[in-house]
Image: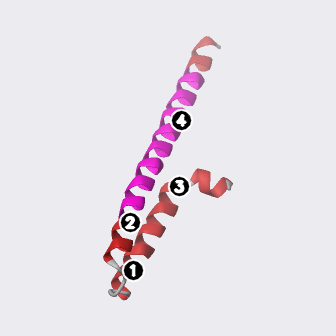
């Protein structure tokens, strides 16, 4: 679970690439299934983006706290 929380964008990219390959090599899949998976992929992408945004914001706060400690010492 720690790997998933640290690298959600990488896992998302691998899953989307695998989905694209499956659709390419199995063209007889029902279009409703493909469209449903595409919608799920878009929703998951939004969740991954929000996770990455939180990680980025948290990293900025850590740097500011380190800077404040350095100036007070």
Q: Which mark is in front, 3 or 4?
A: 3
Mark 3, residues whose alpha carbon is within 10 Å: few (<14), some, or many (≥20)?
some
Question: Residue 59 shows which numbered tag?
Answer: 4
Mark 4: secondary structure: helix
Out of 45 and 64, give the one closest to the viewer. Answer: 45
Tell me where residue 37 sits by quadrant: bottom left
The reply to whether the C-beta atoms of the residues labelled 3 and 1 are less than 8 Å apart is no
According to the picture, the residue beneath numbered tag 1 turns out to be 21
Q: At x 37% / y 87%, what residue is drawn?
A: 25
Out of 12 and 34, give the one closest to the viewer. Answer: 34
Mark 1: secondary structure: helix
Q: Residue furthest top?
A: 72
Alpha-carbon span between mark 3 and mark 4: 16 Å
Q: Tell me: residue 28, above or below residue 63.
A: below
Question: Residue 8 shows which numbered tag?
Answer: 3
Left or right, 46 with respect to 66, comes to: left
Residue 67 in the image, given as x and y percentages of width and height: 55, 22
Mark 2, residues whose alpha carbon is within 10 Å: few (<14), some, or many (≥20)?
few
Q: Quadrant of the C terminus?
A: top right
- Which comes before the other along the chain, label 1 or label 4? 1
């Amino acid at each position: 679970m720690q790997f998933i929380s640290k690298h959600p964008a990488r896992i998302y990219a691998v899953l989307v690439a695998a989905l694209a390959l499956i659709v390419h090599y199995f063209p007889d899949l029902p279009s409703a299934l493909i469209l449903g998976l595409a919608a799920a992929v878009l929703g998951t992408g939004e969740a991954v983006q929000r996770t990455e945004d939180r990680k980025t914001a948290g990293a900025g706060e850590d740097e500011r706290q380190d800077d404040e400690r350095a100036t007070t010492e």
